[in-house]
Amino acid sequence: MTNWIVIGIGGATCSGKTTLAKKLHEKFKNSVLINQDTYFRPKDDPRHVHIPELNHHNWDILESLDMNKMHSDILGILSSGEDDNNQGETKLLIMDGFLLFNYKPIFDLCDMRYFLDLSREECEWRRNRRVYDPPDVPRYFDMVVWPEYVRYKKEIEDDEEVLRGITFLDGTVDNDQTFQRVFREISQKL
């Protein structure tokens, strides 16, 4: 039977979550990588929350994502290998996403949780250099991205059980330094 260690990497948009997750996946050959961004609902999905004053959907809330499907896919991965002859084998499931820890069923599956934080200024600077589909409309960062991030981070900070289970990391620290720290901690757990 395969043993799994589940690593969750959450935090601010443009904080280095995906970069860290990909580096870990490359280094740990016995790993599977899931990116929350692949679970965005289609643009025409009626469940999106529309912001009339911006004539744009709110892509920065849980409702914009099919979290049930993500959870189901994760459970499918974790149950794979139950009939394997690889007794005692340990594999890693590495997940990254900006709202990973605000969805309790996924939060509860994580053995290790890392949250990459950024200041508003750094986050906006980085966000302005990225291209999104659909593209950010003017004022979207100020009206949606940052306020939603602050709200979701506060939800985490206000829940003592959740807060205790997360290691907060500075998203402005060099990517290699962050990687080395997380890699070392995961290696120790293995």
Image (cartoon, rainbow, N blue to C red):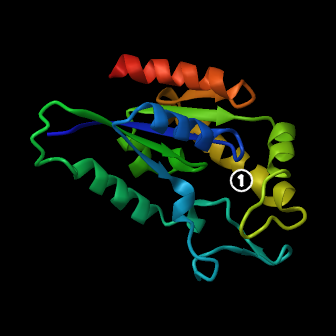
**Which of the image's four quarters has the C terminus?**
top left
Task: Evaluate whether residue 160 shows in this view.
Answer: yes
Q: Is residue 115 left or right of residue 4?
A: right
Frontmost residue, 155 versus 110: 110
**Residue drawn at x 46%, y 51% as measured from the top left:** 34
Total count of labels: 1
**Which of the image's four quarters has the N terminus?**
top left
**Residue drawn at x 76%, y 55% as measured from the top left:** 145
Q: Position of residue 75 (x, y in %)?
A: 30, 54
Frontmost residue, 14 versus 87: 87
To which quarter of the image does residue 186 belong?
top left
User: What kind of residue is marked 1?
Assistant: Glu
Frontmost residue, 187 versus 28: 28
**Residue drawn at x 60%, y 67% as measured from the top left:** 64
Q: Is residue 185 above or below residue 84?
A: above
User: Seen from this angle, which residue lies furthest right?
Assistant: 138
Frontmost residue, 148 versus 190: 190
To which quarter of the image does residue 140 belong?
bottom right
Helix, strand or loop at mark 1: helix
Q: Position of residue 19 (x, y in %)?
A: 61, 40
Q: Position of residue 12 (x, y in %)?
A: 68, 43
Q: Position of residue 8 (x, y in %)?
A: 47, 39
Task: Evaluate whether residue 158 shows in this view.
Answer: no
Residue topped by disc 1 = 148
**Residue drawn at x 9%, y 41% as measured from the top left:** 85
Density class for disc 1 (Cα within 10 Å; few <14, some 14-19, many ≥20) is some
